[in-house]
Image: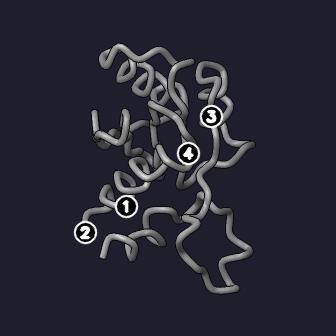
Amino acid sequence: YHSTSPLISGALAAHQQFRMVKILSLNVESGFFTLVVSEDQHLLFCNRFAADNAQELTYLVLFTLNQLAILPEEIKVILHGEVTPYSPVYDELKRFLPHLFFGKKAPSMQYAEEFEELPEHRYHTLLNTFSLE
């Protein structure tokens, strides 16, 4: 599977979990990020972007929402990957996106004890690839 598959699957499943009509899932990596936008459990947009800094990443997220005619206050944003509540990426996104949250472990999956130490959002795509079977 491609790394976007569990991100798309998780975004579509999040509609039932969060009872939100529009969801933006953002998987942050070093120098890149993957953006998935869905509405009513339908994929609207998926792309991987290169971004050198938090401002560039935020600009690309907001530009994408603008192109899809979605206002920031109309969408729940779920963060995954290499981002923390203390990172510049989080700080910059929080300025413009009022419904910004970190992803959680899939409730349908059971994880080994060793994963208790890891932030739930950190390895979302890797840990949830199994659920695509």
Task: Describe residue 16's horizontal placement relative to residue 87 as left or right.
Answer: left
Front label number (1 vs 4): 1
Mark 1 lies on a secondary structure that is helix
Labels 1 and 3: the sequence-earlier one:
1
Mark 2 → mark 4, Cα distance in angstroms: 21 Å
For the N terminus, give its image quadrant.
bottom left
Mark 3–mark 2 Cα distance, whole angstroms, equals 27 Å
Q: CA distance from mark 4 to mark 3?
A: 7 Å
Chain-order first, disc 1 or disc 2: 2
Residue found at x 28% / y 33%: 44
Q: How is the image coloured?
A: one colour
Q: Which mark is residue 1?
A: 2
Contact check, label 1 and label 2, Cβ < 8 Å: yes
- Please, what is the three-letter code of the amino acid marked with disc 3? Leu
Residue type marked 2: Tyr
| Disc number for residue 79 | 4
Q: Which mark is residue 6?
A: 1
Q: Earlier in the sequence, mark 3 or mark 2?
A: 2
